[in-house]
Amino acid sequence: MWARVSVGMAVTQGDTREQKKKRIIMMVLLAVLLMSVSLFLVPQKETETIVVTFPNGATVEAEVAQTPEKQLFGLAFRDELPPGTGMLSIFEENGLHRVRTKAYRFPIDVIWVDESHHVVHLVEHADPCTGEPCPFFGPPPDPARYVLQVEAGLIQRIGVAKGDELKYALRM
């Protein structure tokens, strides 16, 4: 009988260790689940919008492409670009940045702007790329810090020229 009791106690101690391990695993899984759910419940920050003002007073409300993913894909996969809107890529450093229109569904005008907010290069009516390889537009002859993608025809319609100074205002 004594042997039975000590075997029973050993099993009970083993069960307790296994139960503790299971509880710890369950707590870790529950913590991971709660953190994952909280990502969906916390309101996501809306995309920032910068109002770009041209010398003649015309404005464009530009979505800011701050992440490498947004800068890479730009306006791809969108059905349209409403008039008076665009996308402004803000790069960490001046550089000879290029633009591709892969997976774009509409033509665009592209404006490269330096650190002092002066236009350094323009491309009008960059057609969407429908096959491989997709051409690059740019790089500009001078380094640029910003690349503004707008509806095709805007450059001609408002008379944007190399050397124009643009003004930026963050829309709250």
Image: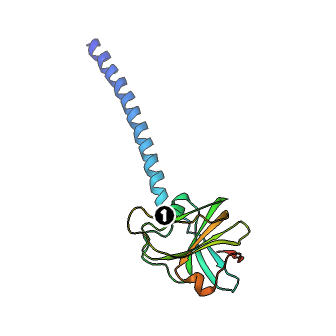
Q: How is the image coloured?
A: rainbow
Question: Residue at 56% of width from left, 69% of height from top?
Answer: 47
Q: In the rendered image, which quarter is residue 10 located in?
A: top left
Q: In the rendered image, which quarter is residue 166 located in?
A: bottom right
- Looking at this view, name the residue that lies furthest to the right: 116
Comparing 15 with 72, the one in front is 72
- Looking at this view, name the residue that lies furthest to the top: 2
As drawn, 102 above or below 10: below
Residue under pointer 1: 73
Q: Position of residue 72 (x, y in %)?
A: 51, 61
Mark 1 secondary-structure assignment:
helix
Residue 15 relative to residue 54: left or right: left
Pointer 1: residues within 10 angstroms few (<14), some, or many (20+)?
some
Q: In the rendered image, which quarter is residue 26 located in?
A: top left
- Looking at this view, name the residue that lies furthest to the front: 141
Q: Quadrant of the N terminus?
A: top left
Question: Residue at 45% of width from left, 47% of height from top?
Answer: 32
As drawn, 43 above or below 2: below
Residue 7 relative to residue 57: left or right: left
Q: Position of residue 138 (x, y in %)?
A: 57, 66
Q: Position of residue 63 (x, y in %)?
A: 57, 72
Question: At label 1, which amino acid type do we have?
Answer: Phe
Question: Residue at 66% of width from left, 64% of height from top?
Answer: 145
Residue 118 relative to residue 124: left or right: right
Comparing 7 with 38, the one in front is 38
As drawn, 23 above or below 59: above
Comparing 39 with 144, the one in front is 144
Question: Residue at 49% of width from left, 78% of height from top?
Answer: 81
Q: Position of residue 64 (x, y in %)?
A: 59, 68
Q: Quadrant of the C terminus?
A: bottom right
